[in-house]
Amino acid sequence: MRPSPSLSLRIRAHITHPDTPRPRAPVQAAIPAAYYRGGTSRAVLFQPQHLPRDRAKWPSLFRQVMGAGDPYARQLDGMGAGLSSLSNICLVEPHGTRSLVPKQAIADRIAYQSLDGARTLLEQVAARGDSVDGVDIDYTFVGLGIESDEVDVAGNCGNMSSAIGPFAYNAGLLPPRIYAKGNGSVTVTIRNTNTAKLIHATFDVAGGQAAVVGDYTIDGVTGPGAKIKLDFKHPYGSKTGKVLPTGNKIDYILDYKVTCLDGANPCIFLRAADVGVDGTILPNDFNKLPDKLALLERIRKAAAVAMGIAPTQDAVPRTIPKIGLVSMSSTHPVLSGQTLQTSQTDLVVRFLSDTQPHPAIPLTAALTTAVAARIPGTLVEQLLAPDPVMDGAITIGHASGRLQVDATMDDKDKTTPINGTVYRTAKRLFEGSTFWTDTTTNTPAERALRSIHGTNGTHSLGMAFVLETRGQPTTQLWADEEPEPPERSPQPSTPPPKTTKPLPTPRDTSNASLAAKGTQWHQWAKRHAKEKKSLRLTVERREEKAKKEERGVQPTTRRQVGLDKWGTPYWVLNEKKERRAARGGRRPGVEVGGGSGVDVRGVGVEGRGEERVPRTKKQ
């Protein structure tokens, strides 16, 4: 056997051993996330509290998660799927505060339905307090480019708005009054930070989480689901503050007659026939007309400048305004292969999103279309069917089917909408962690500017990100908050240069020897104390036994009581043996109880109750 080195050699090797070098390459970091379908769109949902405190890193994180900037337009390196409606990020946080809810409590309540987990979660929610100003949740929508690396926060996504309420409920972000209702219908007030508009989401709760199973179907989604009602409050002026930004119901943009309207999102409407496109064209066929798509993009940018959304065409956002081709209702096929009849729609619209034909219809664009249909003189109102399919609602035909939207106008001002209602379904696809690699190279000044406020405060981090992305100041958001200490960089620091450590001196060796001997003595003292305790307990047990014997308490065994090891009385066993012997014509043998001839039931036992009367054995 190889002898172990001496203590002095081990100490010397430990002192002179160089430190393990830390990795210099960036490593992947995990961030809690969820993936939801909302209406006919999908998005990755984050809580801003879980993101890096330096908001300058968020765009890079979002691009990596969705796989944006893919020249192949497939987004294979992320969660996107090559469509603008599937390349989205949503940020959801409690309105009025930023306090993290323990993930373990959420997991206990949702995954295991544990009462303890639910109780812990409710305690955390109660500590956060009730809603502020009637608003429960702040929601920020971020659109990611597919081939470009653009990060857009210009507008809202109505379809994904249907998933915000269920996600917030499942994540424990809502006020305690909502959880106190238990199962049934609940209503959540959502503030969209992109447009500063309020949305009331009404959905069902079953089994401690937002319901998914239902019988409501929407065109463009396979299978039914639980119905979600969305009420958009005052759905107009989301970008310009006006219903008609140009002041006209019809404008001429590049010699084309258009209607420019700012509803839930700014939109531009023009007749499909005016640009030589079939109003019922499907997306795959539309993509084969690049010249028409380029023309519509030029019209969109020119109209955006006329609406005051951007000063120049180069500064026009990627996602707004949206442009739609309008035509009268007609019989035509949809993507599912079914055929819509003329009597089933009031209007047919084909919208473009990020220069791509939308496979269905953006929900905010549908709301804006319904508002335009209620204003006399617009192109949409002129092409509207005279007899509505459903009273009080506008039935819009799109590439995947139909969508019914209800727009309520002000009684005094017929051009001002006060409410827009649509119905959607949503589904949680997964909850877990996404991974990203921090490759940002922003300067220390930028990091200090955008990370002085961390995860605790009273203002929306999503709102701060929107303002910073638009180049607007955010100092008013943090006026009443104390700045937090700067965040420590997650990147490993550069290791110090290697230096030759001096050999241990005799004093160091002596001290190490004493320390080793002290450790050995400590271990011996622990063993000695354990042995003394065991001996003391043994003596105490013996003394207690002796005291019982002095009081006359005798130890009792099963045999002395007359029981075998299974607790059966011996006289029962003797009777069974005698009966078996009588049936066989044989004399009984030695009795189980020891052959005394006296039934053991009569043995009196001191301290075990009254004495039993002995019974003679049967002859």
Image: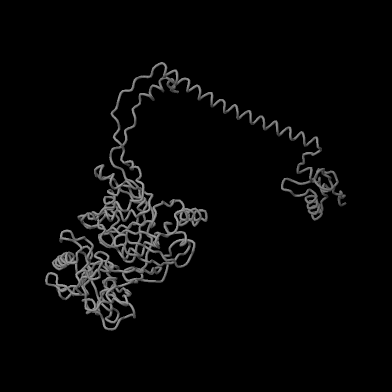
Image quadrant where residue 36 sits? bottom left
| Image location of residue 31, percent across then percent down | 35, 49
Residue at point 24% right, 43% down? 443
Q: Is residue 126 left or right of residue 148?
A: right
| Image location of residue 123, percent across then percent down | 49, 54
Residue 435 vertical placement versus 203 (above, below): above
Depth check: 507 or 452 in front? Answer: 452
Image quadrant where residue 10 sits? top left
Total residue callouts: 0
Residue 591 vertical placement versus 75 (above, below): above
- Residue projecting furthest to the top: 506
| Image location of residue 99, percent across then percent down | 41, 51
Residue 82 vertical placement versus 543 (above, below): below
Depth check: 558 or 314 in front? Answer: 314
Image quadrant where residue 232 sits? bottom left
Depth check: 168 or 219 in front? Answer: 168
| Rendered image coloring scheme | one colour
Q: Is residue 531 left or right of residue 304?
A: right
**Residue 138 shows in the view:** yes
**Residue 77 shows in the view:** no
